[in-house]
Image (cartoon, helix red, strand yellow):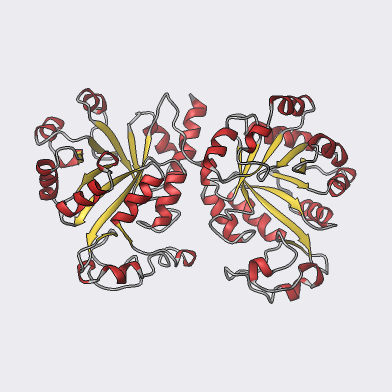
């Protein structure tokens, strides 16, 4: 039976690791149930998107959690009471219109992401099946809180796995029987502060004996996610897909991630957004660049001018911190990041402490003593390492602050011996193209960590570099790396 074959494929895909189901898309970052939210979820490596479908008054299947548009557009109108043509006249908060199911399906096919479809309106299930009959797609499952709507699809020989969503207090097995469902989706996120404890061995054993794979509620608490991913569940929903899809080092090759200017391929470089996403997805270290404003503040921005990455023009040293902190540092990347601003170095020191993370600090134009005083004031000397193109800065740090960790680039020295003789660093960076990658063991013999620099996103290249087992990688495409790392693990 085709439905059972597809269910088996779904379960098999989750054998190594639970699937990430982006709840209403990457709704912790973008407006829920929009093409923007779904496309962003794909960038964050979500395997499936949870979408909500319902019908307009003239029977067009659209994607929206609520019938009323107040939440997503600030307009008190109901989708079910208007034609699709009338619905198109309303603009959502992000500038889009309510998408049709067909539009979302096309995007899913284009990005190779699955759809976990929740039925929100009567009749929506049969319309979904009609559309899928004209545009088949393998990676689909359909469910609802209403068992009758799911059972209706079973009666119509639905070729896609069916799921029943289960509220707190309801018996998942009774609901599954009513719905003729193939999976149970437990919506227990509000049951307690530690809902993973509700997944008792008895419950999981019974689900297994009844051949009912388990899907988990939307979860954004990192501590809960770390518990859930170790359980025999098929998928976990989340508003923040990066918490699930991110890097989890294997003991056999525990590579640490260093994100160049943060997660700069999914958020504007050197912003709080890029740092937060980076830490959430498992990066140990965020790299940042320091310049000094006209009023003597240490600002996190790469260029000597504000022109490229902010709404301002001019040299950083000629702009004051209030101007920089009030500027738009995100729209150049995408309009949805217009609220991002240039941050103080102190802000990053606090942020890294909150995530128990580290910082790789590159000094562009910055007074060494000022930088180190900020670091010491935040008790962050053990959570930072430093580098600069200005060798005088590095000499000053080494002589005045011997406890500080320095990084050196292998390419700047004729030999490893000369590099060490010039002052042994804590970390040596090797460029994947121009440096001798056979020296890693020599570095480790001297107590020096190896950091491999690769700015690309090619999965095959990454797999080969992962096999070299560097201590750290300095990267620009963290989600490409995590995909490659999982492929490497599967090959081992």
The image position of residue 269, as x and y in percent, is 37, 57
In-front residue for pair 416/362: 362
Q: In the image, 43: left or right of 342? A: right
Q: Where residue 403 sits: x, y (%)?
A: 18, 37
- The one of 380 and 288 positioned closer to us in this rendering: 380
Q: At which x and y percent is residue 353?
A: 36, 45
Residue at 15% across / 31% down in the picture? Answer: 416
Count of numbered marks: 0
Q: Quadrant of residue 166?
A: top right
**Can residue 257 be seen by looking at this rendering?**
yes
Residue found at x 31% / y 45%: 359
Residue 307 visible in rendering: no
In the foreground, 267 or 347: 347
Vertical side of 478 occupied by 76: above or below = below
Displayed quadrant of residue 470 = top left
Residue at 43 percent of width and 51 percent of height: 276
In depth, the one of 157 and 342 nearer the eye is 342
Considering the image in quadrants, where does the N terminus appear? top right
């Amino acid at each position: 039976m085709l439905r059972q074959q597809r269910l088996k494929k779904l379960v098999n895909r989750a054998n190594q690791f639970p699937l990430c189901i982006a709840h209403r898309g990457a709704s912790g970052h973008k407006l829920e149930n929009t093409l923007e939210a779904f496309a962003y979820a794909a960038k964050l490596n979500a395997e499936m998107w949870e979408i909500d479908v319902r019908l307009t008054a003239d029977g067009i299947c659209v994607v929206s959690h609520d019938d009323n548009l107040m939440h997503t557009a600030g307009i008190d109108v109901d989708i079910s009471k208007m034609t699709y043509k009338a619905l198109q006249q309303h603009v959502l908060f992000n500038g889009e219109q309510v998408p049709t199911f067909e539009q979302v399906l096309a995007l899913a096919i284009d990005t190779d992401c699955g759809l976990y479809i929740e039925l929100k309106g009567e009749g929506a299930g049969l319309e979904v099946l009609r559309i899928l009959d004209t545009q088949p797609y393998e990676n689909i499952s359909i469910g609802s809180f209403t068992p009758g709507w799911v059972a209706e699809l079973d009666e119509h020989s639905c070729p896609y796995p069916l799921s029943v969503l289960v509220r707190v207090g309801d018996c998942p097995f009774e609901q599954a029987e009513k719905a003729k469902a193939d999976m149970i989706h437990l919506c227990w996120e509000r049951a307690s502060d530690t809902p993973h404890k509700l997944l008792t061995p008895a419950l999981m054993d019974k689900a297994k004996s009844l051949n009912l794979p388990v899907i988990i509620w939307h979860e954004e608490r990192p501590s809960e996610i770390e518990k859930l991913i170790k359980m025999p569940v098929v998928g976990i929903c989340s508003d923040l897909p990066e918490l699930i899809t991110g890097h989890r080092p294997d003991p056999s090759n525990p590579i640490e991630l260093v994100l160049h200017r943060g997660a700069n391929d999914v958020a504007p470089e050197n912003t709080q957004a890029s740092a937060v996403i980076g830490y959430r997805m498992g990066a140990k270290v965020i790299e940042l660049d320091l310049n000094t404003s006209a009023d003597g503040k240490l600002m996190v921005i790469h260029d000597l001018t504000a022109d490229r990455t902010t709404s301002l023009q001019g040299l950083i040293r000629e702009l004051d911190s209030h101007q920089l902190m009030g500027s738009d540092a995100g729209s150049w990347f995408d309009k949805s990041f217009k609220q991002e601003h240039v941050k103080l170095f102190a802000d990053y020191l606090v942020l890294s402490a909150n995530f128990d993370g580290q910082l790789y600090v590159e000094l562009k134009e910055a007074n060494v003593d000022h930088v180190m005083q900020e670091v010491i004031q935040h008790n962050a000397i053990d959570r930072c390492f430093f580098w600069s193109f200005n060798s005088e800065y590095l000499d000053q740090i080494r002589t005045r602050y011997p406890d500080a960790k320095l990084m050196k680039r292998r390419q700047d020295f004729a030999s490893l011996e000369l590099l060490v003789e010039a002052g042994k660093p804590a970390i040596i960076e090797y460029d994947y193209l121009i440096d001798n990658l056979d020296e890693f063991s020599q570095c480790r013999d001297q107590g020096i960590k190896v950091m491999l620099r690769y700015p690309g996103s090619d999965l095959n290249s990454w797999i080969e570099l992962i096999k070299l087992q560097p201590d750290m990688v300095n990267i620009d495409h963290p989600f490409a790396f995590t995909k490659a790392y999982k492929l490497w693990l599967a090959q081992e």
